[in-house]
Image: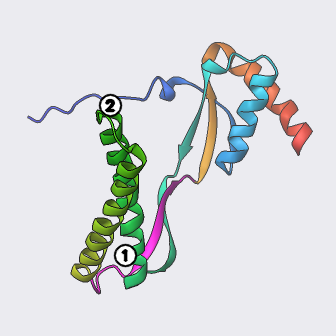
Amino acid sequence: MIETAPAVGWAGVGDRPVVGSYDTYDQAQKAVAFLAENGFPIQRAGIVGSGLRTAETVLGRLTVTRSAGMGAATGARFGLMAGLLVGLFAASGPVLALVLSGVADGALFGAAFGLAAHFTMRGRRDFVSRHAIVAARYDIVADVAVADDARNLLIKYGWRTG
């Protein structure tokens, strides 16, 4: 016989009633802000997204120039941090030179790695994109003891915005 582990909820979300439902996260966030502004004990509420899906926005084609530029930018950031760390612990000397050297070397190596990655992935992923997780609906939940108060305040919020 196979035993299954008990379902683990996230901080009691499952036992808290829904007191408001919104189409976007921004709307739900504004409603929670309204609750907070009106003296509601906001630590007893939460926003729960349901109907989750992944959305990918294609930003553009991944060219050789773009690959090198993105690699150089990443390398420059890493070089800046390395240069700052070395400059922090250096006994004496030109700290600015160390930082600038780190940025330049990081950008050079980053561009090289960006180009190498581009040529090894050629044809498999020739575009740049941004991933996001979005929900079909955002519910505001509250503890049972204060759910009616939250619901009544959100009705007032609906009158004000709707």
Of the image marks 1 and 2, the number of the one nearer the N terminus? 2
Residue type at tag 2:
Ala
Residue 83 position within the rendered picture, expressed as x and y whole percent measured from the top left: 34, 47
Residue 56 position within the rendered picture, expressed as x and y whole percent measured from the top left: 48, 67
Whether residues under marks 1 and 2 lie with C-beta atoms below 8 angstroms apart, the answer is: no
- In this rendering, would 17 be left or right of 33? left
The answer to whether residue 62 shows anywhere in this view is no
Q: Nearer the viewer, mark 1 or mark 2?
A: 1
Q: Residue furthest left?
A: 1
Q: Is residue 134 magenta?
A: yes
Which circle marks residue 68 in the picture? 1
**Looking at the image, which residue is at 32% across and 47% down?**
82
Q: Is residue 66 above or below residue 49?
A: below
Closer to us: 60 or 6? 60
Using the numbered discs, state the Cα–Cα distance from disc 1 to disc 2 in whole angstroms.
46 Å
Q: Is residue 33 above or below residue 128?
A: above
- In this rendering, would 59 be left or right of 158? left
Q: Residue furthest top?
A: 145
Tell me the element at label 1: helix
Tell me the element at label 2: loop
Give the quarter of the figure containing the N terminus. top left
Q: Is residue 76 magenta?
A: no
Residue 149 position within the rendered picture, expressed as x and y whole percent measured from the top left: 76, 19
10 Å neighbourhood of mark 1: few (<14), some, or many (≥20)?
Answer: many
Residue 25 position within the rendered picture, expressed as x and y whole percent measured from the top left: 64, 46
**Looking at the image, which residue is at 29% across and 87% down?**
123
- Looking at the rendering, the stretch of residues picked out in magenta corresponds to 122-135
Closer to us: 139 or 113? 113
Residue type at tag 1:
Ala
Q: Is residue 88 above or below residue 152?
A: below
Tell me where residue 140 sits by quadrant. Answer: top right
Which circle marks residue 7 in the picture? 2
